Image: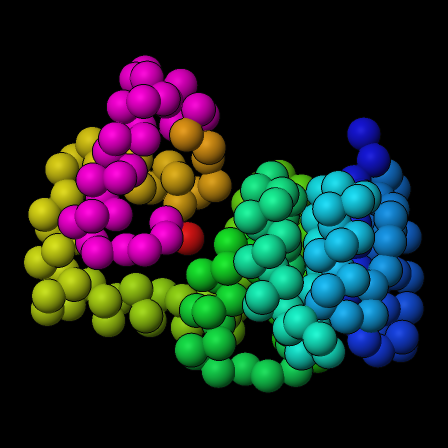
Amino acid sequence: MTLRILLADDHEVVRGGARALIEKETGWEVCGEAVDGRKAVALAETLLPDIVVLDIGMPELNGLEAARKIKRALPNTEIVIFTGEENDQLIHEVFATGARSYILKSDISRHLVEAIRALGQHKHYFTSRISEVVFARYLDGASGAGKAKAEGLTPREREIVQLLAEGKSNKETAVVLGISIKTVETHRAATMHKLRLDTFA
């Protein structure tokens, strides 16, 4: 089955470089290209790509907002965001949109193909630098009040959180644990309430 990828960046050179990397891979195709965030959303809704590669700093609608709109319209479409910037807060904002990968533009040639391969299996992809930031924030959050809240989860809730965090759907989680989808959804809602989360991402 062909993996269909939409590219969105306002720089033609970047799109060309990404396209060249993608088209070297057997069974992958660039199904469309967008030069701004609004066109990226419109094309995604029309072309229904498997993966969208978004630049964060596009005109009209930035990559973060475009990612949110695409995930709302197409929850099964995976998103990788790339940027020239690197700061801890931005990394967390990227993952809060539902994107599963964040790559620096300087790392595209080394990491884009691996990121797309992981997203094609609905898995996250982190470079070592991004992993450090994500886990540092997790460890910081696990101290003090954050740790107390996390310790309030039942063993079943912890199991469900881990499976969902690994990229499994509610249905897949239900199958793994031998419970109903409704039960997974109930535990998921309870977990979000306990941890005071607005979104599961």
Magenta region includes residue 34:
no
Taking the image as shown, residue 58 lies to the left or right of residue 170, namely right
- Residue 163: x and y, percent? 37, 37
- Quarter-of-image position of residue 50: top right
Question: In the rendered view, would you say 47 is above or below 185?
Answer: below
Is residue 5 in view? yes
Q: At x 61% / y 45%, what residue is drawn?
A: 73
Q: At x 77% / y 70%, what residue is drawn?
A: 36
- Quarter-of-image position of residue 6: bottom right
**On-image quarter of the N terminus:** top right
- Residue 42: x and y, percent? 76, 54
- Quarter-of-image position of residue 100: bottom right
Helix, strand or loop for the magenta stretch, by majority: helix
Taking the image as shown, residue 188 lies to the left or right of residue 64, namely left
Give, as a single range, the part of the protein colored magenta: 171-200
Is residue 82 in view? no
Colour scheme in use:
rainbow
The foreground one among 136 and 60 is 60
Question: In the rendered view, would you say 148 is above or below 77?
Answer: below
Q: At x 32% / y 31%, what residue is drawn?
A: 185
- Residue 158: x and y, percent? 23, 40
Magenta region includes residue 178:
yes
Q: What is the total number of numbered labels drawn onto the structure image?
A: 0
Question: In the rendered view, would you say 5 is above or below 133?
Answer: above
Q: At x 45% / y 61%, what residue is drawn?
A: 96
- Residue 2: x and y, percent? 83, 35
